[in-house]
Image (cartoon, rainbow, N blue to C red):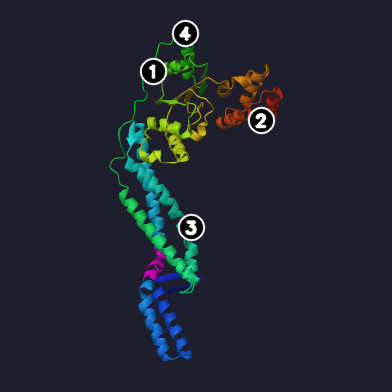
Amino acid sequence: MLFPCYFGWKTTLANVTFEFDNIFIMRLLLVTYNTLLILGSSYHQVTTECCDYKDKDRDCIVGQTSYTCKLEHNLKALTVELAKLKARSDDLKDRVDLAEQQRMKQLNQVQLWLSRVQTVAVEAEELIQNGLQEIQKLFFAACFSKNCNSSYKFGKQVARKLEEIVDLNEKGEFERVAENELAPQVDVRPTEPTVGLESTLANVWRLLEEKDVGIIGLYGLGGVGKTTLLTQINNKLSNNLIGYDVVIWVVVSKDHTIEKVQEKIGEKVGLSNELWKNKSYDEKAIDIFRILSKKKFVLLMDDVWERVDLIKVGIPVPNQDNVSKLIFTTRFLEVFGEETLDSHPDTRGLAQQVAAKCGGLPLVLITIGRAMACKKMPQDWKYAIEVLQKFFA
């Protein structure tokens, strides 16, 4: 018996090429099914069941084959469109970075598009990774099995994701990516005369001009003029940035949170829209780090009550490479670290040796600093020196 067929889908297995069409296969199986029924029952029963099949399942099968027959084609198209989307996204990010360097603020619609692309790209990559397995499953599956239904659902997901990416590509053509000038590089703040603090101000300013110092702490009891001194530094930078790109002022009060610190920094670097505010603090940290790592910044943190985890906030650790600065005020020696250094006559010298053994590596300094913050006995510091010597040997 000859069966008319359409050779549309080509699959290679064991060096043999098969060309077939799902509709043809289902017709073939249906004929086989009806033939078996004829052998065991009346012709009337076969005719009834065949008609039931046509009436109830015809539309369903046509819908399924539209996704399963095109699965391989759609996966290839999805791969191509995803590559286009990523390239368009990278180009757009470059334009945004250039605009931000020119003190422009990113458009909300651009940020929304980039955020959507990030999510959709992850979903599409997962579908592409599972695509080969689904194609193999479809080839070996019986047409009326659960595997066939699973392949139909997968094919539908691929088709819809392809439509979504094509739509994103079409909507990703932006004539403008940014507008409006960002906030001034330095916000001048009201202040009082620094009576008796002139020498301290001069010392801090000197440290601002040095490359070897990244973090500067100002310690003192409440009311001695720490905030006034920090304000004077801020306002002096408004007249002479001495090479810095931006100055950021953040009050880190007793009830501060990572999110509050991030929002203050975000306002200064153009990340203050509602979309950004609704992000998690991890996502905000990534955005802050991306912007600040390209700038030479001065971060002024007033009234620090406890240690602030710079990495969690998204602040690049000031060092000789980025030549940025962090200046903070505090009334607590625990934050400053002086209490530990003054706990024993030998501690300060040993601490300097530990710092030297860290080789100027920021992450090593932070990790060792946290571990040794409460160590007041000289033997603890000597042990740390021995460990570091073995580590860098």
- SS state under label 4: loop
Distance of label 4 from label 1 (alpha carbons): 18 Å
Residue 208 on the magenta segment: no
Of discs 4 and 2, which sits in the foreground? 4
- What's the CA distance linking mark 4 and mark 2? 42 Å
Residue type at tag 2: Leu
Q: Main secondary structure of the magenta part?
A: helix
Is residue 65 one of those drawn in magenta?
A: yes
Q: In front of the other: label 3 or label 1?
A: 1
Q: CA distance from mark 3 to mark 4?
A: 68 Å
Magenta region: 63-73
Q: Position of residue 195 (x, y in %)?
A: 44, 8
Nearer the observer: mark 1 or 2; the answer is 1
Question: Mark 1: which secondary structure?
Answer: helix
Image position, residue 83 (x, y; %): 40, 52
Mark 3 — residue? 129
Q: Residues within 10 Å of mark 4 (few under 14, many from 20)?
A: few
Is residue 326 in sight in this rendering? yes
At x 48%, y 90%, the residue is 39
The reply to whether dot 3 and dot 1 touch (C-beta < 8 Å) is no
